[in-house]
Image (cartoon, grey):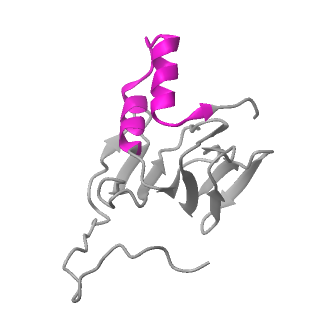
């Protein structure tokens, strides 16, 4: 497999790097204290990828088994332990561990062992911010039709298994 098609045709390069300081406040904080930093949204990368830093505050949380049809999702655990559903079982991923899930791969993630931090990488760069923000606002009071439409809009298909 060779290199992908050229994305830049200039002769001299350009000044376009962006710094996201580590001490910048989170872009989103969930009611349970979980935080999300939008390090590189799909919009900011021209749709190439999305990268988010996820901080679990401590109480167990995270999505159950699901899959995506249009994107891959990867996890790199920075601190603590995150349980990842690999399509068969919940496996423990600790600091330094990496998990890649191709499109269609059943997966889920949750923290059951206290606080943890990880990077979430989506490729291509879908607009996941709307998904994160919709869930943070709460789904209480949503009709089943509204919930199903929201999940379909954000390419999330739930499956049985835990």
Magenta span: chief secondary structure = helix
Taking the view exactly as shown, the residue that stands out farthest to the left is 15
**What is the span of residues highlighted in magenta in the rendered image?**
128-157
Residue 85 seen = yes
Q: Give the quadrant of residue 69.
A: top right
Residue closer to the observer: 78 or 155: 155
Taking the view exactly as shown, the residue that stands out farthest to the bottom is 12
Taking the view exactly as shown, the residue that stands out farthest to the right is 88
**Vertically, is 55 above or below 32?**
below
In the rendered image, the quadrant that contains the N terminus is: bottom right
Q: Residue at x 36, y 35 (%)?
A: 133
**Is residue 145 found inside the magenta-colored segment of the image?**
yes
Residue 31 seen = no
Please count the marks in the image.
0
Q: Position of residue 49 (x, y in %)?
A: 43, 59
In the rendered image, the quadrant that contains the C terminus is: top right
Residue closer to the observer: 139 or 43: 43
Residue closer to the observer: 8 or 68: 8
**Vertically, is 14 above or below 59?**
below
Q: Residue at x 57, y 58 (%)?
A: 75
**Is residue 119 found inside the magenta-colored segment of the image?**
no
Q: Is 99 on the left or on the right of 138, as rendered?
A: right
Q: Give the quadrant of residue 141.
A: top left
**Vertically, is 95 above or below 68?**
below
Q: Position of residue 97 (x, y in %)?
A: 64, 66
Q: Position of residue 93 (x, y in %)?
A: 67, 58
Q: Residue at x 46, y 35 (%)?
A: 154
Q: Is 128 on the left or on the right of 59, as rendered?
A: left
Q: Position of residue 90 (x, y in %)?
A: 75, 46
């Amino acid at each position: 497999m060779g290199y992908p098609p050229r994305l830049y045709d200039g002769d001299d390069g350009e000044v376009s790097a962006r710094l996201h300081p580590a001490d910048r406040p989170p872009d989103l904080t969930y009611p349970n204290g979980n935080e999300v930093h939008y390090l590189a949204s799909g919009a900011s990368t021209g749709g190439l990828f999305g990268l988010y830093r996820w901080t679990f505050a401590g109480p167990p949380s995270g999505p159950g088994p699901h899959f995506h049809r249009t994107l891959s999702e990867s996890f790199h655990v920075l601190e603590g332990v995150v349980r990842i559903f690999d399509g068969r079982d919940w496996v423990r991923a600790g600091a330094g561990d990496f998990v890649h899930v191709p499109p269609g791969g059943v997966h889920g993630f949750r923290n059951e062992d206290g606080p943890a931090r990880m990077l979430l990488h989506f490729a291509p760069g879908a607009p996941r911010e709307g998904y994160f923000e919709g869930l943070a606002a709460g789904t209480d009071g949503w009709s089943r039709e509204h919930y199903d439409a929201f999940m379909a809009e954000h390419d999330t298909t739930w499956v049985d298994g835990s």
